[in-house]
Amino acid sequence: MKKILFLFSLCLCFACNENISAEAGTTSEENSESIKETDSVPNFGIVIHGGAGTILKENMSDSLENAYKAKLEEAIRTGHEILANGGTALEAVQRTINVMENSPLFNAGKGAVFTNEGTNELDASIMDGETLNAGAVAGVTTIKNPINLAYEVMVNSEHVMLAGKGAERFAQEQGIEIVDPEYFYTENRFKSLQRIKDREKTELDHDGKTAFTDPYIKDSKFGTVGCAALDKNGNLAAGTSTGGMTNKRYTRIGDAPIIGAGTYANNKTCAVSSTGWGEFFIRGMVAHDISAMMEYKGVRLQEAASEVIQEKIPDLGGDGGIIAIDHEGNVAMEFNTAGMYRAKMNRKGELEIGIYGE
């Protein structure tokens, strides 16, 4: 009888263990499938800036702050929707920047600042991280959306950069929208030019020395716009557009249209758009330097961005910031000024908008 009970107990234990193992196996398999399902969703993301400088909460009205946040959100959601639907990083960068170029809030397109001669001279660049192809325009005065012309230079010419009247002739051949220079006139930008002339000094786009005199931050100087994106195919792209420096002379060109300084993208590393004191960003080749540090030193995006913006550029005497995204979807929004208009969105649709140095 004892032997029978013992054998029965053994059989019962074996059956229970089989049950538990089977259940455990099913659970593990289900978890594995769940993980695979999550991993199978292609990663993508987007990050933008609307300029960096001495942007302080105490000098910003609630209505103006809300206007900036609303436009930043509109812009980044435009690009995010393109990426979510399987569109390319290049398209997302273009269309996102178009939203900011069409707004008078930013120093790009419609809101471009005035030169010493009372005109508007616009610059832009774009780069494809998959092919390392790039296009740029400088000193154009009749192009509604300079980033679109930069794209056409990249895909429909053998060149990288076109400038001035030649760039505008090329724009007409490509069917790019041309506007009367009066389109770029905004009262606050024009008044900023007059105040600067009254002070008889050249005021840099991101110079921190001038006192605030109206609700437009620093005489509306902070507004270079940029975007960097990673699409579902794993391709990176970046673009930058600007009106440059208020009261600039001699067709001055900053870093925005310079590939490697204002814009850079490489699928091996990251996509970067810069905003700051252009002369120093050109000397430091900021956008490319961040990518090069990642490629040659093997450092992560945030580490590279921090070293370049917090150490290298200040050592040269410049200031400003960058936004960037790497081939894994990691984002950096680094600046050494009091603030930077910025926003980012990941594949989950999580949105983060910032203005001040918070």
Image (spheres, rainbow, N blue to C red):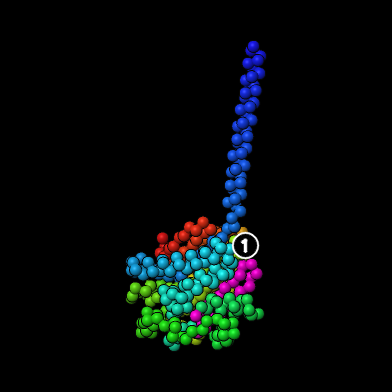
Give the magenta range.
122-144
Q: Quadrant of the C terminus?
A: bottom left
Q: Quadrant of the N terminus?
A: top right
Q: Nearer the viewer, residue 198 or 154?
A: 154
Residue 272: x and y, percent? 55, 67
From this viewpoint, is residue 358 visible? yes
Q: Residue at x 34, y 73 (%)?
A: 215
Residue 50: x and y, percent? 46, 70
Q: Is residue 131 magenta?
A: yes
Q: Residues within 10 Å of mark 1 (few under 14, many from 20)?
A: some
Q: Residue at x 41, y 66 (%)?
A: 69
| Location of mark 1 (residue) | 233
From this viewpoint, is residue 207 visible? no
Residue 247: x and y, percent? 43, 83
Q: Is residue 119 magenta?
A: no
Q: Residue at x 59, y 78 (%)?
A: 152
Q: How many numbered marks are there?
A: 1
Q: Nearer the viewer, residue 66 or 189?
A: 66
> Is residue 119 shown left or right of residue 269?
left
Rendered image quadrant of residue 267: bottom right
Q: In the rendered view, would you say 319 is above or below 144? A: above
What kind of element bears circle 1? loop
Label 1 sits on what residue type?
Asn
